[in-house]
Amino acid sequence: MQAPPPFEAKLCAPERLDERVRSLARPLVFTNGVFDLLHRGHVTYLARARALGASLLVALNSDASARRLGKGADRPLNALADRAAVVAALGDVDLVTWFDGDTPLALIRGVRPEVLVKGGDWRVGDIVGGDEVRGWGGTVRSIPFEHQRSTTALVARIRGRSGARSAAGPAPRRPRRG
């Protein structure tokens, strides 16, 4: 039997998070989300988030938590274990955990990140945990979108619903030969 891939060491159950966070380099950057069907917008966002500190912790919504976000009764498409593995496999991510609540506030209070980030669709003042992070001297950032992508629109496109091409971005150009 083969040893598990190295990225699996980045997966951390919430009850072991305190212990694992102690070994991460500081400043610690914290972000959260569903990260259902990973796309270019997600990986660019995570790279930009990681650049704000020495390590990046990503907290994923559990399947039940994700369903409560109202993205559709059949979402997430990928189960938590699969979403966590894919995110953990990214080089910019140092640790992946999850939460079952509607917000990650308890995790944020527990790990006390120096930097809290969300995507550009969040106003800084609306980011859950922002008051707490600023209260202990940290910073809160909303990272602007660089690639307009939407998992919801991508799912609609896959299912054959019209109007989703722009959400997936322009079709790639083929290189000229000759």
Image: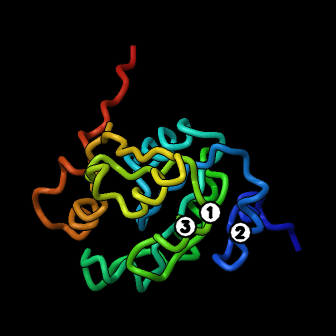
The residue sitting at 34% across, 30% down in the picture is: 174
The residue sitting at 30% across, 31% down in the picture is: 173
Which sits in the foreground, 85 or 27? Answer: 27
The quarter of the displayed image where residue 16 is located: bottom right
Q: CA distance from mark 2 to mark 3?
A: 11 Å
Which sits in the foreground, 19 or 8? Answer: 19
- Secondary structure state at the residue bearing disc 3: helix
Dot 3: within a 10 Å radius of its alpha carbon, few (fewer than 14), some, or many (20 or more) residues? Answer: few
Left/right of residue 36 with respect to residue 153 in the rendered view: right
Which residue is outermost to the left?
A: 162
Q: Disc 3 marks which residue?
A: 109
Q: Disc 1 marks which residue?
A: 111
- Dot 1 and dot 3 residues touching (CB under 8 Å): yes
Amino acid type assigned to the residue bearing label 1 in the image: Val
Left/right of residue 49 with respect to residue 131 in the rendered view: right
Residue 98, above or below 111: below
Residue 1, above or below 126: below
- Dot 2 and dot 1 residues touching (CB under 8 Å): yes
Dot 1: within a 10 Å radius of its alpha carbon, few (fewer than 14), some, or many (20 or more) residues? Answer: some
* N-terminal-most mark, 2 or 1: 2
The residue sitting at 80% across, 67% down in the picture is: 4
- Secondary structure state at the residue bearing disc 2: helix
Amino acid type assigned to the residue bearing label 3 in the image: Arg
Q: Disc 2 marks which residue?
A: 18
In the picture, the quarter occupied by the C terminus is: top left
Question: Where is residue 163 shown, x and y percent of the image?
Answer: 11, 56
The residue sitting at 46% across, 44% down in the picture is: 139
Q: CA distance from mark 1 to mark 3?
A: 6 Å
The quarter of the displayed image where residue 3 is located: bottom right
